[in-house]
């Protein structure tokens, strides 16, 4: 019936109403929930939807170091509002490389890393995949499940996508054997989208040994790793440990793409701060790659927004600022880990049926609770607890004050016949 | 370990050719690298004051102070951006009267400056207009228009615009080409201060194009990057947009605040579609969001907040209008200065087109060989098309530039 309606509404060049045939697009699965939460008038409502950090008072949090540096940037009389270069702020880019690949990575010195500032993680992914489409087109393998916007970005870039079975619903852990099996059937030259740490939405990460297995199959099938890193610092609490996979693959000689976001770990969400890195085999190829990256960027935004990158650069290039940031990040991450522990305790105390070990085992912002879509709907409609229908819960939205209510609500929906 | 090492020597990227340097930003990079003390940058479209310095507007500084005092958070904007900015931007573009009557049916989305407006607008057009719909662009146009259309998968056609003989608009050629265009085509118009030629259409000409648009059911896509910056009057500069909308013609409008608010690096812009009613507008906004999400998830906040505060705070709005007028006036002064100085040097050529053209840019008429000499001998940086950014001229360098132009053209044809 809908298709017929669409056909009937086809744009008729002689008609006056050129947009008549347009249908309402579905709300974004994630932002849509944020809107619903906002509209809810209940005073017990809990927002576990969007991956944005909240304090124990349920307030958004601006890092103190960010506030300080933002003041510096806005008040600096030597700074103006001129265009950044297409590839962004040089200091920022250099700082991103060091944070991702290591202060002393030989790849930086050898000019094998091509970096461009991008519009947050999404921007880096889109630029990376547009580059892939134009220069090394191939099938893209994404984890099942993955962040919903991954699928849209890859589709808009005009690439085919397939899934590898990442999450094992039985163990609520990483399905290593299944992933390796699937990737070993992939066509040579395919691209594999890998979450560096704090997998979104499952919170489940491969172990170091499992990463080596993934590296092995990528080498055998000549797969190109495309890493998405949105939570460096949020997984283990140690920024070096969190990017083990990227540094290991780099050490093993992989040429690859990395998308890096500072939305969460610097709380710079709305300033759209990120970077894309392409690792090549030598600096001559790097120059060619950069020239083509710039063409992609030029047709999306011409050049990236300045203020967020200036703030981030001050952190990445100044030791005092950097240490202050790392300390604050540890506090923020510590609170999320504490909430995981608290929730598990409450669930255990209430003797909620089921095994809830995964809540403390999983890392980062999110937990894949294992709740069904119907249970999630009930949680929302009856208990005003907002989460994704996939069962993904943002732990950053839990507080010491609402954790008990949350546990009780979970108990109620799990026990409901 | 051996096989891993071999990976380094097999290059995944070996087939990647060197991409061409951006014709505009490439020249700016050349300028930056030049150590000469007499160098002049007439390449990039960015305003400079009489000392050749970039300007942060006073209205912008004050808006930033207000933001600082409010101690706001850094949460994600919604996918469509800052709503109060979108509303203020639409009001500025379409005019108070039209906005009061039709604001509810204009679908708006905050975007990454003018580039983002064109990209999102073209992606939307590709997705929702019938397959095979072409976008017609003026010849010449900002080169990035072509790149963006290609990336969005839209087929491009051109309509004649600049007449090199008269150094003005080839209007009969324009009308002829648009008459031949397919019904329902997207027509890209520069709302004011045509880039790169500086040649704008008259009201009579716009009226003729309006009739043609109605006859052929064109979808006009106005790219407006210089509102206020052109004549000094924001309403006058939006005349074409308002002429079309007053007659009920649905348009697409891309607005940039890079130049008129000096917010260049903040990437502040707005894209809007005139719809039939509020329900349609809601649907269009929902579809714009679906396309924006995989481009940038949500737009950057800072510049939009600044623009929002300026447009919605009466004293700041007044101050801004004065500042924009001042910038436009200085540019006009430099146009006249350059043209007159060339005349007084005894140039055999007619340079009056420089003072007749309008906006940031002048299509001087010099060719690629002249340009090479201007760069190599005089360290004056401009585009090989002969386009100069008037904003790069000031009382300190206009004589030097005039002398250089005179020197390289006195014995040649233009």
Image (cartoon, coloured by chain):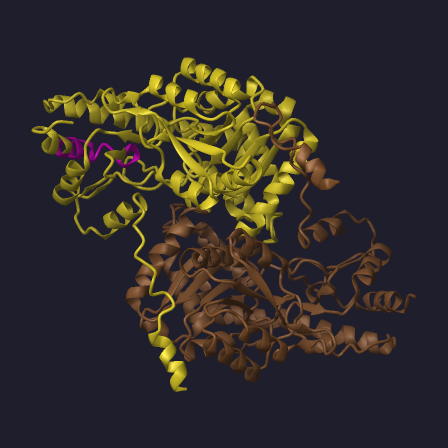
Q: Which chain is yellow?
A: B
Q: Position of residue B365 (x, y in %)?
A: 21, 29
Which color has been applied to chain A in this rendered view? Answer: brown
Depth order, front residue of B239/A416: A416
- Judge from the rendering whether residue B15 lies leftward or rightward of residue B340; answer left or right: right
> Which residue shows up at 52% across the image and 52% down it?
A271
In terms of image quadrants, where is residue A7? top right
At a point 15% along the width and 25% down the height, the residue shown is: B342
Give the residue at x 24% y 25%. Answer: B164
What residue is shown at x 33% (from left), y 55% (from top)?
A291
Magenta portion: prevailing SS class: helix
User: Which region is colored magenta?
Assistant: B389-404
User: Up-down: is B371 above or below B21?
Assistant: above
Residue A139 magenta: no
Q: Nearer the viewer, residue A88 or A369?
A: A369
Q: Residue furthest bottom?
A: B1
Residue B399 falls inside the magenta stretch: yes
Q: Nearer the viewer, residue B309 or A37?
A: A37
When asked about the image quadrant of residue A57, the answer is bottom right
Q: Would residue B244 appear left or right of B388 to someone viewing this image?
A: right
The mark tally for this picture is 0
Q: Position of residue A307 (x, y in %)?
A: 46, 52
Q: Residue furthest right?
A: A417
Residue B326 screen position, x and y as percent: 37, 28
């Amino acid at each position: 019936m809908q298709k017929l309606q669409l056909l009937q509404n086809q744009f008729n060049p002689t008609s006056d109403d050129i947009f008549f045939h347009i249908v309402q697009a579905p709300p974004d699965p994630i932002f849509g929930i944020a809107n619903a939460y906002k509209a809810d008038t209940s005073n017990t409502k809990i927002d576990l939807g969007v991956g944005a950090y909240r304090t124990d008072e349920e307030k958004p949090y601006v890092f103190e170091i960010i506030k300080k540096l933002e003041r510096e940037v806005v008040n600096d009389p030597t700074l103006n509002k001129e265009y950044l270069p297409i590839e962004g702020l040089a200091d920022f880019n250099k700082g991103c490389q060091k944070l991702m690949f290591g202060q002393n990575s030989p790849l930086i010195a050898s000019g094998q890393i091509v970096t461009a500032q991008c519009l947050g993680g999404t921007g880096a992914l889109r630029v990376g995949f547009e580059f892939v489409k134009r220069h090394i087109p191939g099938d893209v393998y994404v984890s099942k499940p993955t962040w919903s916007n991954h699928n849209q970005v890859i589709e808009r870039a005009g690439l085919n996508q397939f899934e590898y079975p990442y999450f094992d619903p039985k163990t609520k852990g990483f399905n290593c054997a299944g992933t390796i099996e699937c990737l070993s059937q992939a066509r040579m030259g395919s691209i594999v989208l890998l979450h560096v740490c704090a997998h979104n939405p499952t919170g489940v990460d491969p172990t170091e040994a499992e990463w080596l297995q993934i590296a092995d199959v990528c080498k055998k099938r000549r797969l190109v790793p495309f890493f998405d890193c949105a939570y460096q610092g949020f997984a283990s609490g140690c920024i070096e440990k969190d990017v083990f996979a990227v540094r290991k693959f780099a050490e093993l000689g992989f040429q690859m793409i990395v998308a890096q976001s500072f939305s969460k770990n610097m709380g710079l969400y709305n300033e759209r701060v990120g970077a894309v890195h392409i690792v090549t085999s030598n600096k001559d190829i790097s120059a060619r790659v950069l020239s083509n990256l710039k063409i992609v960027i030029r047709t999306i935004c011409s050049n990236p927004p300045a203020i967020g990158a200036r703030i981030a650069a001050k952190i990445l290039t100044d030791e005092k600022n950097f240490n202050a940031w790392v300390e604050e990040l540890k506090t923020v991450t510590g609170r999320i880990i504490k909430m995981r522990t608290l929730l598990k305790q409450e669930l255990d105390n209430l003797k909620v049926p089921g095994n809830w070990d995964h809540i403390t085992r999983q890392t980062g912002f999110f937990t894949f609770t294992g709740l069904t879509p119907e249970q999630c709907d009930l949680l929302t409609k009856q208990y005003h607890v907002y989460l994704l229908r996939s069962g993904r819960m943002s732990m950053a939205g839990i507080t010491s004050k609402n954790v008990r209510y949350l546990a009780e609500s979970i108990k109620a929906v799990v026990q409901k016949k | 370990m051996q096989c891993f090492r071999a990976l380094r020597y097999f290059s995944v990227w070996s087939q990647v050719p060197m991409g061409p340097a951006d014709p505009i930003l490439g020249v700016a990079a050349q300028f930056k690298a030049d150590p000469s003390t007499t160098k002049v940058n007439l390449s990039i479209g960015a305003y400079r004051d009489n000392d050749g310095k970039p300007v942060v507007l006073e209205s912008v500084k004050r808006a930033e102070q207000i933001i600082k005092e409010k101690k706001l958070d850094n949460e994600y904007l919604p996918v469509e951006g800052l709503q109060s900015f979108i509303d203020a931007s639409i009001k500025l573009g379409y005019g108070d009267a039209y906005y009061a009557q039709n604001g509810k049916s204009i679908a708006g989305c905050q975007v990454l400056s003018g580039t983002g407006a064109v990209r999102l607008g073209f992606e939307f057009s590709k997705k929702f207009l019938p397959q095979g719909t072409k976008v017609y662009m003026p010849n010449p146009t900002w080169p990035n228009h072509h790149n963006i259309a290609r990336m969005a998968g839209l087929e491009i056609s051109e309509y004649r615009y600049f007449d090199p003989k008269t150094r003005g608009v080839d209007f009969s050629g324009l009308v002829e080409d648009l008459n031949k265009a397919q019904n329902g085509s997207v027509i890209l118009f520069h709302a004011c201060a045509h880039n790169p030629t500086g040649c704008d259409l008259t009201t009579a000409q716009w009226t003729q194009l309006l009739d043609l648009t109605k006859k052929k059911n064109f979808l006009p896509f106005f790219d407006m990057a210089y509102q206020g910056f052109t004549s000094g009057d924001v309403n006058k500069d939006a005349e074409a947009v308002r002429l079309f909308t007053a007659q009920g013609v649905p348009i697409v409008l891309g607005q940039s605040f890079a130049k008129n608010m000096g917010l260049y690096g903040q990437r502040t812009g707005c894209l809007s579609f005139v719809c039939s009613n509020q329900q349609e507008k809601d649907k269009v906004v929902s579809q714009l969001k679906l396309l924006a999400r995989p481009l940038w998830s949500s737009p950057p906040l800072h510049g939009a907040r600044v623009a929002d505060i300026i447009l919605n705070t009466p004293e700041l709005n007044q101050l801004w209008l004065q500042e924009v007028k001042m910038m436009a006036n200085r540019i006009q002064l430099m146009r006249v200065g350059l043209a007159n100085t060339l005349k007084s040097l005894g140039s055999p050529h007619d340079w009056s087109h420089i003072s007749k053209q309008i906006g940031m840019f002048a299509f001087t008429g010099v060719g690629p060989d002249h340009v090479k000499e201007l760069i190599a001998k005089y360290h004056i940086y401009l585009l090989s098309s002969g386009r100069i950014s008037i904003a790069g001229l000031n009382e300190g360098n206009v004589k030097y530039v005039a002398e250089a132009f005179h020197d390289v053209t006195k014995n040649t044809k233009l």
